[in-house]
Image: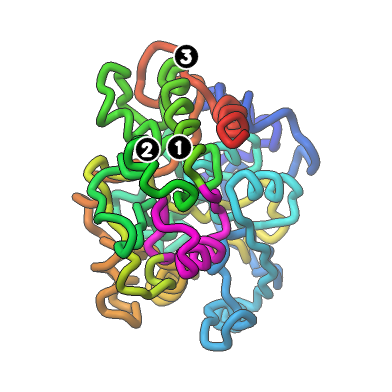
Amino acid sequence: MRIRKLTRRTRAVVVALAIAPLLMVAACGDDGGSDEASEEAITELGENEGQVSILAWPGYVEDGSNDPEVDWVTPFEEDTGCEVTSKVYGTSDEALNLAKTGEYDVVAASGDLSLRLIAAGEAAPVNTDLVPNYENVFDFLKDTEWNSVDGVNYGVPHGYGANLLMYNEESVDPPTSWGAVFEEEELAKHKGKVTAYDSPIYIADAALYLMKHQPDLEITNPYALDQKQLDASVDLLKTQREYVGEYWSDYLKLISAFETGDTTIGTTWQVIVNAIGKDNVKAVLPEEGATAWNDTWMLSAQAENVNCAYAWMDYIVSPKANAQATEYFGEAPNSEAACAETTDPTHCETFHAGDEEFSKQLWYWRTPVKECLDGRDVECTDYSQWTTAWTEIKG
């Protein structure tokens, strides 16, 4: 299949037909880079360039420098001749700004970032036929609303996980609902010791709770909020703010806060629970379900090392490498083949890998756009409005 070459500017216009409202949030023209910076896709690979630059969450690109026993980068370099340089980021907003510099060939993007990269003209379509290990990936992670647009694929799925509710059972009765961190009567029991994820995308957590408990708001998708629904979510979070001791984006700080007892309840990832390793600190998937992430390895539209980038994408979703990376980070691997490679035989059971019923309870991060994601013929609020609201919430 031959795919015609497009300039970066032309390709952004084509994508805009599918996700035009998002351009208001993520793209304000071609800020840096050549108009010939990328192709829409490639149909065959050439020789590896000898290097590749990667932008990713912490723990995704480990070369032994943090822990000599944790290294899946060196085998890749030895097998491909592609020397890896990498940079980690703490939030999707930070990653967007870094990606726009054009310094990275590959980006690991959660669903609240992937569409923004596409709309900004910063992501190139990926020919999955050139990624042999793609065929192993769970089908329910392929061709999703956060890694594809109009049938065009923009990356390969990595790992996934839920945003859970963590608590210290020595001071908190085991919760079954997100009401433990949203209802004022419950919050008052833990004033100053409540935590929440520090990002505008956390508004979706409040919206998910309201979707289940205030049906009159008619929320059907926590990432598709009209102004009234956004206002209700913001009001809920402003109430919560009075009881929050600290918001977190660095999970190492959250670990420390739970270990010292400064924080006793709040949103978390399973990896944080595992890292704390105390019997009294537990996490639960509340009855309302949860928001979640499924990260995608994306090719930068400004990539200078496309062949090595494809080599990395194929390698990191291969069974052994994907098992190493997702087990180290603390999330579900992307395939049954990867599950067979984990050192902990219970890892995939712990993280519900391949469990579609569990996955159906999750609302994977999406970028809010004005064209409502739930299909309503009304104007929804976009990510820029969520960002403004988040600033107001935190004060």
Image spot of residue 277 (x, y percent): 38, 75
What's the CA distance linking mark 2 and mark 3? 27 Å
The residue sitting at 19% across, 50% down in the picture is 357
Element at label 1 = helix
Image spot of residue 204 (x, y percent): 42, 35
Name the foreground residue: 56 vs 188. Answer: 188
Q: Which tag, 3 or 1, sits closer to the chain's start?
A: 1
Q: Which tag, 1 or 2, sits closer to the chain's start?
A: 2
What's the CA distance linking mark 1 and mark 2? 6 Å
Name the foreground residue: 45 vs 245. Answer: 245
Q: Nearer the viewer, mark 3 or mark 1?
A: 1
Name the foreground residue: 203 vs 382. Answer: 203
The residue sitting at 47% across, 14% down in the picture is 379
* Proximity of marks 3 and 1: CB atoms separated by less than 8 Å: no
Please, is residue 181 above or below residue 138 in the view? above
* Proximity of marks 1 and 2: CB atoms separated by less than 8 Å: yes
Identify the amino acid type marked 3: Glu
Please, is residue 83 above or below residue 23 in the view? below
Image spot of residue 59 (x, y percent): 54, 69
The residue sitting at 56% across, 32% down in the picture is 393
Q: Which mark is residue 379?
A: 3
Identify the amino acid type marked 2: Phe
Q: Nearer the viewer, mark 2 or mark 3?
A: 2
Element at label 3 = loop
Q: Which tag, 2 or 3, sits closer to the chain's start?
A: 2
Residue denoted by label 2: 182
Identify the amino acid type marked 1: Gln
Start and end of the magenta stretch?
A: 245-272
Residue 255 part of the magenta segment: yes
Q: Which mark is residue 175?
A: none
Residue denoted by label 1: 240
